[in-house]
C-alpha cells in the first residue's frame, strides 16, 4: 500500500511539474503577454499538526479583471487542489479550492490584489484556514516585479 501511495504522489508531482514547465515554455514562446505574473507562496497550516500549503496561482494580467486558476498542495504531499475563481477590476478576489488528489485543501479564498503582493484569506477545512500574503513572480523579470 505504501508503494502505491508513494507511486501515485510521485506520478502526480511529475504531472504538476510537467504542467508548470509547459506553462513556462508557453510564456517564453510569447503565449502570455509581458504583464502576466504568477502568485507564488506558502501559508502555515491552521493547526500544530497541519502541513504548510504551497500556492501557485495564475491571475489575469495586472490591473485587469478576469479568471484566476492554479494549484495548492500540502507540503507533505497528502493532497493537491485546484484553485478557480475571479479577480475584479478593483482587485477583489473570490475563488474556491477543490481537492483533486488525496486530501487536498478545500474551501473558499478571498483577498485583495496589490501591485507586488496579494493578501489572501482562506476559510476551509481544519488545516486550510489561513490569512497570508503571497508575492508576485513575473516571467518577464524572472522574479518579483
Image: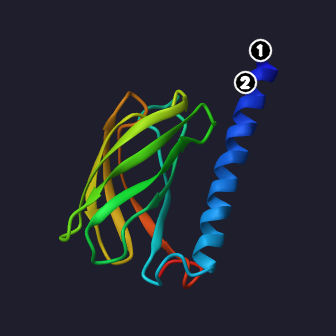
Horizontal side of 59 relative to 4 (left or right) equals left
Residue 86 vs 49, above or below: the answer is below
Residues at marks 1 and 2, CA–CA distance in whole angstroms: 6 Å
Residue in the picture at 60% in, 71% down: 26
Residue 101, how many percent across, how many down? 56, 31
Q: Quadrant of residue 66?
A: bottom left
Residue 2, how many percent across, how many down? 78, 19
Q: Quadrant of residue 125?
A: top left
As drawn, the residue found furthest toward the top would be 1
Horizontal side of 85 relative to 53 (left or right) equals left
Horizontal side of 46 relative to 88 (left or right) equals right
Say which element carries label 2.
helix
Residue 10, how many percent across, how many down? 75, 38
- Determine which of the numbered discs, if any, sits on residue 1 in the image: 1
How crowded pointer 1 is (Cα within 10 Å; few <14, some 14-19, many 20+) is rated as: few
How crowded pointer 2 is (Cα within 10 Å; few <14, some 14-19, many 20+) is rated as: few
Mark 1 and 2 residues: CB-CB less than 8 Å, in contact? yes
Quadrant in which the N terminus appears: top right
The residue wearing badge 2 is 5
Horizontal side of 17 relative to 89 (left or right) equals right
Say which element carries label 1.
loop
Amino acid at each position: 500500500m505504501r508503494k502505491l501511495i508513494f507511486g501515485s504522489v510521485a506520478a502526480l508531482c511529475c504531472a504538476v511539474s510537467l504542467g508548470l514547465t509547459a506553462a513556462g515554455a508557453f510564456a517564453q514562446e510569447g503565449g502570455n503577454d509581458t504583464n502576466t505574473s504568477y502568485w507564488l507562496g506558502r501559508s502555515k497550516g491552521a493547526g500544530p499538526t497541519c502541513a504548510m500549503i504551497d500556492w501557485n496561482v495564475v491571475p489575469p494580467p495586472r490591473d485587469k479583471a478576469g479568471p484566476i486558476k492554479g494549484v495548492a498542495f500540502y507540503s507533505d504531499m497528502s493532497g493537491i487542489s485546484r484553485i478557480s475563481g475571479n479577480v475584479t477590476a478593483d482587485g477583489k478576489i473570490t475563488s474556491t479550492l477543490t481537492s483533486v488528489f488525496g486530501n487536498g485543501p478545500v474551501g473558499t479564498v478571498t483577498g485583495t490584489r496589490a501591485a507586488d503582493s496579494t493578501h489572501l484569506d482562506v476559510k476551509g477545512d481544519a488545516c486550510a484556514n489561513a490569512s497570508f500574503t503571497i508575492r508576485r513572480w513575473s516571467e518577464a523579470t524572472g522574479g518579483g516585479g
